[in-house]
Amino acid sequence: MSNLTDDNIDFITQTINSSMIKSAEMKEDLIDHFCCAIEEDMKKGLSFEKSYDNAYQNICPDGFDEIQREPVFLLTFSKLKTMKRYLYLSGYLTAISMTITLYFSLTGKHGGNIALLVSSLLFIFLFLPALFLNQYKRELSKNISTKLAIISGFLGIALFFVSVVFKISHWPGAKIILLLSFAIVNLTYFPFLFFKMYKKSLT
C-alpha cells in the first residue's frame, strides 16, 4: 500500500497553483481531489507518474484551465463552498457563546450554567458536525483506518461535551458518558493516530 509523499503533494500543489484557475478555494479543492484519486491508484501498485496521468485524464482531460467551466465540478465546488461557510458561521456562533460563558464565570453573574449549556449544545449540534463533515470530505487519505480515526475522534469529543451537558443539567449518566468518551479516544483514536505517525516515519 503506497501513500503520497510530501514531494508528491508539493508537485501536485505547484502544478495546480501555476494554472490559470482564479479561485484559490477551487485550487485547494482540486488539489485534494487529485491527491485522493492518485493515492487510490498508487494503492493498486501503480507509480506516482502513472497515477497522476490517470487522474489528469479522468478529472481534467482538456486541461486545468477548462475545468472552471465543467458543470459537475462547479456543482461540487459550490457544495464544498457552502459547507465551508456553514463551518465558519457555526464556529463564529460557538465562539461567541463560549466567550459569554467565560464572562459569566469570571464575573460570578447568574446564568453561567445556562450559558455553558447553550454553548455546549451549539458546539455539539452545530459546529462539531460541520467540522467533522469538512474534515472527512477533505482528508487526503481515504483508507478505512483514516476514516475510523476521524469518526472515533469526533465521536469522543461529542460524547465528552454531552457528558458536560448531562452534568450541568444534573441528569443521570454523566460519568458513564464521560468514561465512554475517554475509552473511545484512548482505544480507537489515539491508536489510529500514532500508528499512522509511526507508519509515516518508516517511509
Image: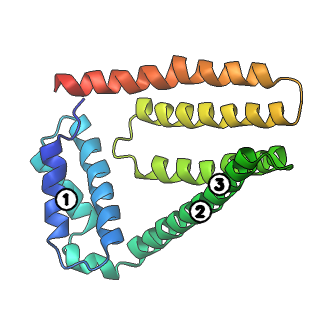
Q: Given the image, on which type of amino acid does mark 3 rest?
A: Thr
Q: Secondary structure at mark 1?
A: helix
**Picture coordinates of residue 93 (x, y %)?**
65, 61
- Residue 123 or 103: which is nearer the viewer? 103
In this picture, residue 109 sits left or right of residue 100: right
**Picture coordinates of residue 197 (x, y %)?**
30, 26
Q: Residue 45's quadrant in the figure?
A: top left
- Identify which residue is drawn at 31% across, 63% down: 28
Q: Given the image, on which type of amino acid does mark 2 rest?
A: Tyr
Quadrant including the N terminus: top left
How much space separates mark 2 and mark 1, taking CA atoms? 29 Å
Residue tagged by mark 1?
A: 13
Residue tagged by mark 2?
A: 92
Q: Secondary structure at mark 3?
A: helix
Q: Label 1: how many residues lie within 10 Å, few (<14), some (14-19) or many (20+)? A: some
- Identify which residue is drawn at 35% across, 78% down: 70
Q: Earlier in the sequence, mark 2 or mark 1?
A: 1
Residue 99's tag is: 3
Q: Given the image, on which type of amino acid does mark 1 rest?
A: Thr
Q: Mark 2 vs mark 1: give the one in front.
A: 2
